[in-house]
């Protein structure tokens, strides 16, 4: 078994189509893959169909943008193996996608005020089939520089971070609601990259609420993170998962299957 369980496609903020990703997965001899597009389960039939054609098992997946209101920080929850129709997940996430879209349109308006050219209709067409515009989509219209360059990072920080003119975030869903929605749809809830978002303290509380796993393998995790995650896994009987957090050209320089789930 060779599985990459953290992949993003053009159904959210990834740059690549399902077909392109699956061809790469086949070339790298993956046996299992999970598309964990942000806050959406769209595209399941396409993902499943291409997987069957290439003899790669596609596991239903999602990454929910949540919030730890006790500690006032973002936290992401991965969901796997839920019923594809996912009524509880959709009920929770669809309003979140609407808030993201509304916020992105507001961000574009602010950026246009600085003299940048951003055409809403053009961007909306280009982001299809994603149900919402993401900052990565906006950045692609502003610069031809790649995600990993200094030029890209400086512009991103100028616009979207700190006192940037478009540095407004959305209201995320409660992390416990995210776990419960996944469980209600028959899925397995996993704490995503706790080293990246420093969500370690939350793990025991979520385990009591139905969390069944924790992400071990992730590009941002250090050896110290691995040790801490394994300790939490043992103590709270959590399965270990992992993957590349692949976003294509909208993310770091990494390929499908470079990192695999334990």
Image (cartoon, rainbow, N blue to C red):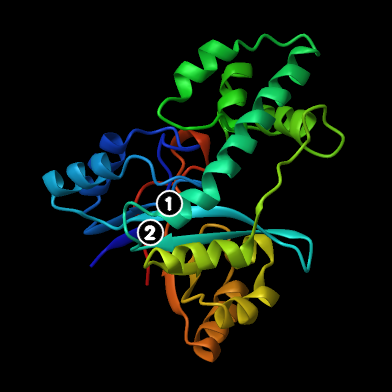
Which mark identifies residue 5? 2
Label 2 and label 1: CA atoms lie apart by 8 Å
Which mark identifies residue 108? none
Name the quadrant of the C terminus: bottom left
- Left or right, 114 with respect to 5, comes to right
Question: Quadrant of residue 50 in the image?
Answer: top left
Q: How many circles with numbers are drawn on the protein?
A: 2
- Counting from the top left corner in percent of width and height, residue 205 is at 64, 79
- Left or right, 146 with respect to 24, comes to right
- Please report contact status of discs 2 and 1: CB closer than 8 Å, yes or no: yes
Q: For mark 1, does the 10 Å Cα neighbourhood hold few (<14), some (14 to 19), or many (20 or more) residues?
A: many
Can the viewer see residue 36 in this picture?
Answer: yes
- Left or right, 7 with respect to 167, comes to left
Q: Nearer the viewer, residue 153 or 104?
A: 104
Name the residue: 80% across, 13% down: 113
- Counting from the top left corner in percent of width and height, residue 138 is at 61, 24
Can the viewer see residue 258 in this picture?
Answer: no
User: In the rendered structure, which disc, 2 or 1, sits on the residue that comes first in sequence?
Assistant: 2
Question: Quadrant of residue 225 in the image?
Answer: bottom right
Vertical placement of 33 versus 251: above or below? below
Name the quadrant of the N terminus: bottom left
Q: Nearer the viewer, mark 2 or mark 1?
A: 1
The residue identified by callout 1 is 36
Name the residue: 53% across, 17% down: 123
| Element assignment for label 2 | strand
């Amino acid at each position: 078994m060779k599985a990459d369980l953290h992949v993003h496609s053009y159904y959210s903020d990834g740059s690549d189509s399902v077909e392109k990703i699956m061809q790469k997965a086949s070339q790298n001899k993956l046996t299992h893959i999970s598309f964990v597009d942000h806050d959406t389960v769209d595209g399941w039939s396409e993902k499943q169909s291409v997987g069957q054609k290439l003899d790669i098992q596609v596991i239903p997946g999602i990454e929910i943008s949540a919030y730890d209101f006790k500690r006032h920080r973002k936290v992401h929850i991965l969901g796997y193996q839920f019923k594809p129709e996912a009524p509880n997940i959709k009920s929770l996430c669809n309003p979140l996608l609407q808030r993201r879209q509304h916020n992105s349109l507001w961000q574009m308006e602010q950026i246009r005020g600085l003299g940048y050219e951003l055409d809403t209709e053009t961007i909306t067409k280009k982001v299809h089939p994603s149900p919402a515009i993401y900052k990565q989509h906006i950045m692609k219209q502003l610069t031809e520089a790649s995600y990993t360059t200094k030029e890209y990072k400086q512009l991103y920080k100028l616009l979207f971070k700190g006192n940037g003119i478009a540095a407004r975030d959305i209201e995320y869903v409660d992390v416990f609601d995210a776990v419960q929605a996944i469980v209600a749809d028959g899925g397995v809830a996993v704490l995503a990259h706790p080293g990246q978002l420093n969500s370690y303290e939350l793990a025991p509380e979520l385990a009591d609420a139905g969390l069944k796993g924790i992400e071990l393998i992730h590009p941002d995790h250090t050896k110290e993170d691995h040790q801490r995650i394994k300790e939490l896994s043992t103590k709270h009987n959590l399965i270990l998962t992992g993957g590349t957090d692949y976003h294509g050209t909208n993310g770091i320089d990494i390929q499908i299957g470079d990192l695999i789930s334990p």
